[in-house]
Every structure is written in C-alpha cells, then in structure tokens.
Amino acid sequence: MNSMWTFLVLSLLTAGAVSAQDSVIEEMNEDYLTLGSVEVARVEVDVLGQEIAEKLTYSDLKQNMRGLVTDENKSVTGQDPGKVIAMGRELVALGEDIYRLVIKGKPHNTTNYAPVSIIPKIGNTHVDIFDTENWSIPRKNTYEITYKNLYGMTVVKFRYSVIYSYGGTYNGKGAYITGAHMVPDSVMTSFGFDFSANMKLNGLTNQGTKENPVAAAVLAMEYTVETILQASLETDSYHITGRGGFKAL
C-alpha cells in the first residue's frame, strides 16, 4: 500500500512539473520572442538627485528579421594594451580595437584594456603620454537602452556611461583626449534573450591646425539582442573632442 501511495504522489509531482514546463513553453511564443522596439535615452540627475531620461531615438524593428547576426569582430585578449589603433597626420590613437563590454547578458571584465587616448604624433611614433599635461577631470555621459517585445514588455535594459578626459597639452599646445571608454553600469535580460555589447573607435580627426591640433574622435557602441527567432544589431555613435565637445550622432 505504501508503495502505491508513493507511486501516486510521484505521478502527481511529475505531472505538475510537466504542466509548469508546458506553461513556460506556451508563454515563449513568437510574439514574446519578437522585438517590437528599441529606445535610447540619455540619463541625467537633477539638483534633487532625481534621474531624468531624455529619449534620443526610437526605432520600430522589423518583425520579419529572422537571420542571426554573425559576430565577425576580432577577439580582444587584453594583451599589449595601449597599442596603436589609428594614426593621422598629427594624431595617434592608442588603446584596443574592440572592447567587449557585455557578453550574453553579463558585464565583461574590461580592466585589462587600456582606454583610448589620442595624443600627438611625432615622426612615425607618438609622444609619451606622461609628457602631456593640463588634463581635465573625466567627463561622464550616461545612456540607457530599452528593448520591448510585441507585448510591450521590457525584455532588455542596458545602462552604460561614456567617459573621457580632454584638454591635454604637449609643450603648451594642442588639445588631446585620454581615458576614453564606455563602462557597463547595469544590464537586465529576460529569459530567452541574449544581449552583447562592444565599444570601438570609429575614426579620429584633427579639428585644429597642424601647429595646434585639436583631437576629435567617434566612439561607437555596438549592441546585439538575439532570440531563437531573430537578432537585432544597433550602433550608437558619439563624437568627442579635445576641447570637451560631446555629441550623440
């Protein structure tokens, strides 16, 4: 008799587990896994310490996206930090080609990567950054990305900050950039969604003269959301200058 009761109890527990699993699968339908919108907002704090989100862009994503995005970016090993990644006539950019900020919903350790610096070029090399001076305190701009599915549910939320110092001079001239990087502040992903984000330098220019250069650069945040049905690749770009200029492109 005891064995029969044990069998009945186990049967009921198994049936309950299967029912719960079916419920989860039923909820993981096409509308749940299909992205409906993505919104990027700049986050600021007012004098009372309250956050203010200023929406920058809004995009309706195509529902017929079904092909997964292939990541063809070169892996970053963290070795040889501070290598030359771009060079102009008067400027050199040091850092890494790509910084992996988030991998499948988890912040990636970026402490092994040198932030991007744009400093003077002398001949075929660059000056020692320790020979520069007059740097500003770091400037920080914070943004939040929100993805919603077709139900209007928030399925991915990612907050990050763009940080850099500017105004550096060499021999009393120029306006250069150092410590330019993006920091993942927080990331939330719902079940069934994978989120990844990378930062890279998209170019540098001299907005000054040959004798008195003003460094300028475009930093790009590339981020991908993937489900079993689709993938969405987006890019946010920011223009920074050695005079402290900052603009979302």
Image (spheres, rainbow, N blue to C red):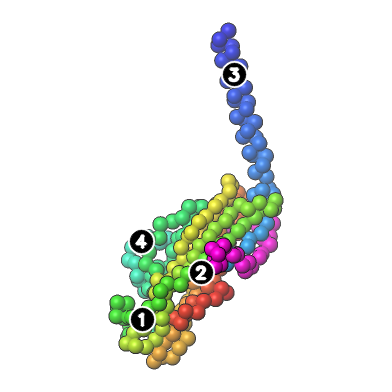
Closest to the observer, 38 or 194: 38
Q: How many marks?
A: 4
Amino acid type, residue under disc 1 in the picture: Asn
Amino acid type, residue under disc 4 in the picture: Asn
Kind of element beneath mark 2: strand
- C-beta proximity under 8 Å, tags 1 and 3: no
Q: Tell me the magenta residue range.
A: 43-71
Looking at the image, tell me whether mark 1 or mark 3 is earlier in sequence order: 3
- Disc 3: which residue: 9
- C-beta proximity under 8 Å, tags 3 and 2: no
Kind of element beneath mark 4: loop
Looking at the image, tell me whether mark 3 or mark 4 is earlier in sequence order: 3
What separation in Å lies between label 1 and label 3 (alpha carbons)? 75 Å
Q: Residues within 10 Å of mark 1 (few under 14, many from 20)?
A: few
Closest to the observer, 51 or 77: 51
What separation in Å lies between label 4 and label 2 (alpha carbons)? 22 Å
Kind of element beneath mark 1: loop
